[in-house]
Amino acid sequence: MIYSDIAAITGAAGRRDRLLFVGLTVFSTVLQAASVMTLIPVLHALFGDQPSQAWPWVGLLVAQLVLAWVADGLATRAGLRLGFGLIDAIEVAGLSAIRRLDPAELHSPRASRLRDLISTAAPESISVVVLLGSPLIHALLLTPLLALMLLAVAWQLALVALAGGIAMFLALVAGRRAVAKSEEAFADAGRELDDRVLEFAWAQPTLRGAGVGTGTLDGVLRASRRRGLRLLAWQIPGDTLFSVVLQLVLLAFGATTVALYLSGDLEPVAAAAMIVVLLRIVETTGSLSLLSTPSASAARVLTSVRELVTEHQAAGDPRAGVVRGTGLARGLRADGLDFTYPDGTRALREVDADFPAGAITVIVGGSGSGKSTLLDVLSGLREPTGGAVLADGVPAAAPDRLAEASVVFQTTQLRPGTLRENIGAVDDAALPALAERAQLTELVETLPAGWDSRVGESANALSGGERQRVGLARALAKPAGVLLVDEATSALDAITERAVVDALEQVRGERTTVIVTHRPALVALADQVIVLDDGRVVDSGNVEQLLARGGVFADLWTRWRQTEGWQV
Ligand SMILES: Nc1ncnc2c1ncn2[C@@H]1O[C@H](COP(=O)(O)OP(=O)(O)OP(=O)(O)O)[C@@H](O)[C@H]1O
C-alpha cells in the first residue's frame, strides 16, 4: 500500500529510483540472511580438524557484509531522491489545491489538512522512505529468507521459522488492532465523561435550586470507571499477545533444534549457529513491532498525499498551461450536472442545458440559485459531483475546460506589475484593437507610461470600472473558445456596462459566451436565457418567449426594471 502510494505520487519520473531502492534493499536483505547462514561453515571449520580452513568462509562473510552495506548505501541515495520527489509533489499539488480553495474554505478542516501536509508531511517524506522503508523491507523479508535457507540445514527448522514468523506477524497485527480499538473506545468514553461534566456544570443553578447534590455525576463517574476497566481488560491482551507468541516461537525453535541435535540430524556447530538465526528472527520481528505504528501513520499520510496529487493531476495546473486551448468556439452541453459543496449544500441538481457554439447564453436566477457554481463548473474551476460537461459532444475534463475558457469575474484582481503584464501574453500589435474592444484606449492614453504604467494596489490605483475593463481585456486576450462572464457589471458605471455589452456583441459567433447577470442591458444580448431556481433549470428560451410565458423570469425582469428605474 505504501509502495503503490509512493509510485502514484512520484509517477514515471520516480520509477528508476523506486526500482533501485526496492531492488537494492531486497538484495541487501538477501545478503544479510546469507551471511547468517555462512556462520555454519565458519563454525564448522573453526571447530573442525583444520581451523585455518575457516578463512575462505570468513572472507565470504566479510564480502557479504560489505556488499550489503554498499547496497544499503546506494539504496539510501535512491531513497533520498525519492523523498525529494515526494516533497516536490506534495508542495506542487498542495499549493495548487490551496490556490483552488474557495475563499470561504480557507479556514475549513480541508485547508488545515493541506497546511499540515505541506508543513509536516513534506519534510517527513524523506524519513518515510529512508528511515522507514528500508527497515520495513528488511524486517518483512528476513525471516522468510532465513526459513528458505534453513531448508538446506533441516526442513523442520525451516518450517518452524516460517510458521513462527507468520504467527508473530499476525499476533502483531491483531495486538495493534485490539490496542487501537480500545484506545478509540477510551477516547469516546473520555469525551462522554467530558460532556457529562460540562452538562453538570451548566445545570448547577437548577440542581442547587432543587437542592440536588453530586449524586447524578457520581453515577456517571462510576459508570465511566467500570467502562474504563472493561477496556483495560482488552488492552492488556492486545499488548501481551505478541510477546506470548514470540516466546512460544522461541520455545518451538529451541525444542526443534535440541530434538534434531539429540537425534543426530543436526551437527553441534549447526545447532550453535541456530542461536544466531534465532536472535536475528527475534530482532527483526521486534523491529517490526516498533515500526508498525510509524508505518501505519506514514501510510495514512501517503494516502492523503496521493489523493491530493491525483486531484491536482485531474484539475491540472492553470499556471502550467499543460493543456492548450484551441481558441475555437465549441458547443457546450451540461449533461445532468450535479454539484454538492463539501458542507453538503447541493448547488446544482441535474442541470441539463445546451450552450450552442458562438451563441450568447444568459443565466438568470435568484440569489443562491446556483448561477456562479454553474459557471465555475463550465469553466473547469470545479469538477461536477455528478454528470458531465461535453464540448462538441465529447466529455471535457477540467483541464480542457480551463484551457478553453476565459472568465470575467465579478471583481478583477490586479497583479502588481504593468498594465501590459496584467492583460497577459499578447502581441504589441494586437494591443490597440484589444484596448478599443474593452474601451481601455482612453485610460491607456492618460496613464503616465501607457501600457507600461504600473498598476495594482500600491501603484496607479484604477477605479472599479477601469479594473473591470482590464479584466475584460484580459479575458479577450486569451485565445479561448468559451467566454464566461460572472455578473461583471453588477455594481458598475454606465461606461463599463456599455464596454461589456459592446465587447460581447462583437464576440458573438466567435466564442461560446455564457453570462450570469441581472442587468437588462446584458440580458437583452441573449440568444437564449436559462432560468435557474434552487439549482435546477426551471425555464429556458429567448427573452420574448420567457416574458410571454410569465413565471420566474418575468418576475425577475419586472423587479430589475423597477430597480433600474429607481436607481436612475
Ligand atoms: N463555497 C461554498 N460552500 C458551501 N456552499 C456554497 C459555497 N458557495 C456557494 N454555496 C451555496 O451554493 C448555493 C448556490 O450558490 P451560487 O453562488 O452558485 O448561487 P448564485 O446563484 O450565484 O448566487 P448569488 O447570485 O447570490 O451569487 C447557495 O445555496 C450557496 O449558499
Image (tube, grey):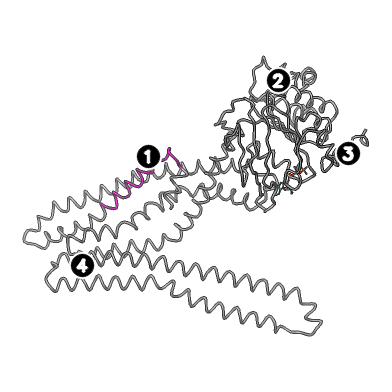
Q: Position of residue 332 (x, y in %)?
A: 64, 33
**For residue 423, above or below residue 164:** above
**In the image, what residue type sits under mark 2?**
Asp
Instruction: Identify the element where label 3 is drawn.
Output: helix
Say which residue label 2 marks.
452
Magenta span of residues: 10-30
Which label lies toward us, 2 or 3?
3
Report whether residue 410 is seen. Answer: no
Identify the main secondary structure in magenta: helix
- Mark 4 and 3 residues: CB-CB less than 8 Å, in contact? no
**In the image, what residue type sits under mark 4?**
Gln
The mark total stands at 4
State left or right for residue 413 relative to residue 227.
right
Spatial CA distance of label 4 from label 1 is 40 Å
Q: Position of residue 250 (x, y in %)?
A: 28, 71
Say which residue label 4 marks.
156
Spatial CA distance of label 1 from label 2 is 47 Å
Which label lies toward us, 2 or 4?
4
**For residue 125, above or below residue 288:** above
Spatial CA distance of label 4 from label 3 is 92 Å
Mark 4 vs ligand 1: CB under 8 Å? no
**For residue 33, above or below residue 185:** above
Q: Which mark is residue 369?
A: none
